[in-house]
């Protein structure tokens, strides 16, 4: 079992969304498809629910998923290529 401080340890969504070797537009597209699909299902369930508690719970899940999508998009935006950073550090010295 890998530990959190192990540099080779990666969370599951790092396979596509967090991989710096995949171009950013592809990562944004995958993120938009995943979050958009989840939001579609949750909002559709919220509209179709006959009970108020179902509408409230689905609305909360939709807001949670929207927040998660925004956080992951920010992570993609500010993530840099590790090999590029390593190259820049070696050129300075």
Image (cartoon, grey):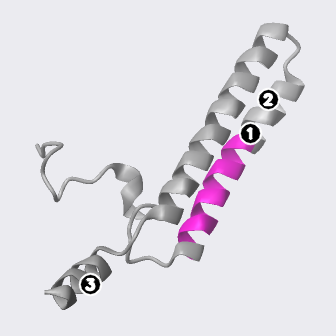
Task: For marks 2 and 3, give the CA distance.
Answer: 49 Å
Image location of residue 79, percent across then percent down? 42, 65
Q: Secondary structure at mark 2?
A: helix
Q: Badge 3 is on which residue?
A: 88
The residue nearer to you, when weighing 85 against 63, is 85
Task: Give residue 92's position: percent from left, percent from top.
Answer: 20, 87
Mark toward the start of the polypeptide (3 vs 1):
1
* Residue labelled with disc 2: 45
What residue is drawn where x is 13% and y is 43%? Answer: 3
**Disc on res. 41:** 1
Q: Secondary structure at mark 3?
A: helix
Q: Tell me if residue 79 comes above or below residue 89 in the rendering.
A: above
Q: Quadrant of residue 45?
A: top right
Q: Is residue 80 left or right of residue 50?
A: left
Horizontal side, residue 3 vs residue 12: left or right: left
Is 12 inside the magenta-drawn segment?
A: no
């Amino acid at each position: 079992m890998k530990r959190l401080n192990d540099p080779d340890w990666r969370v599951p969504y790092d396979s596509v969304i967090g991989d710096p070797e995949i171009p950013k537009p592809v990562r944004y597209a995958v993120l938009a498809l995943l979050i958009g699909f989840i939001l579609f299902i949750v909002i559709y369930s919220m509209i179709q629910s006959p009970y108020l508690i179902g509408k409230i719970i689905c609305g909360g899940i939709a807001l949670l998923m929207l927040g998660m999508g925004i956080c992951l998009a920010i992570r993609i935006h500010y993530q840099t290529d590790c090999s590029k950073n390593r190259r820049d550090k070696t050129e300075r010295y």
